[in-house]
Image: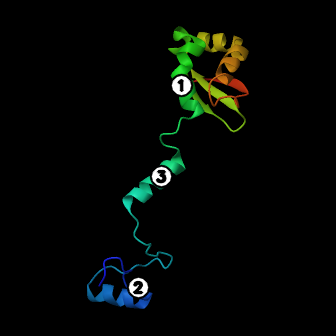
Amino acid sequence: MPSDAEPTRFSRTAEDLIASLRRLPLETNPRTRRRATQEVSALVNELVVRHGIGIETPEHTIREQWATIVGPANAAYSHPFQIDSKGRLIVVTSHAIVRNELFLHRATITKKVQQLPGCSAIREVFLRSG
């Protein structure tokens, strides 16, 4: 049999009979199906593309530049958390004074963030205690 030939597929009844003869558990879920074998490299590539692994994201860019955007003292007590679907940058602060400081400078922070590559879609900064 050539190595690139597709293995023979049996009906569900034949599969159940073979499993019974080999004393293997029968598949009880009728919706289960066997999928064609794929190479691991193809699966890994699909996951990399689907989850954007290795691609520079706006969140990553902002996190890298956060200390230069808000200053090292404020960056020590705050961090950019995520960008929501409305274009808001959600920032989590751990100290009330830092939250107030960032609140007063929201417009400046927003302008600095918008100047970063890939971050022009940020519309505002939303502060959250955490």
Residue at 37% across, 59% down? 40
- Vertical position of residue 24 compared to residue 119: above or below: below
Q: Earlier in the sequence, mark 3 or mark 2?
A: 2
Element type at mark 1: helix
Residue in front for this viewpoint, 108 or 12: 108
Q: Give the quarter of the image for residue 82.
A: top right
Q: Amino acid at mark 2?
A: Arg
Does residue 98 appear to the left or right of 21 in the view shown? right
- Vertical position of residue 55 compared to residue 103: above or below: below
Residue at 33% across, 79% down? 25
Element type at mark 2: loop
Total tally of numbered discs in the picture: 3
Q: Earlier in the sequence, mark 3 or mark 1?
A: 3
- Vertical position of residue 3 compared to residue 52: above or below: below
Residue 48 visible from this viewpoint: yes
Q: Amino acid at mark 3?
A: Leu
Q: CA distance from mark 3 to mark 1?
A: 24 Å
Q: Earlier in the sequence, mark 2 or mark 1?
A: 2
Q: Give the quarter of the image for residue 127.
A: top right
Q: CA distance from mark 3 to mark 2?
A: 28 Å
Residue tagged 3: 47
Label 1 CA crowd tier, 10 Å (few <14, some 14–19, many 20+): some
Horizontal and vertical percent position of residue 121: 70, 31
Q: CA distance from mark 2 to mark 1?
A: 52 Å
Residue tagged 1: 63
Horizontal and vertical percent position of residue 76: 50, 14
Horizontal and vertical percent position of residue 120: 69, 28
Q: Amino acid at mark 1?
A: Arg
Does residue 92 appear to the left or right of 34 in the view shown? right
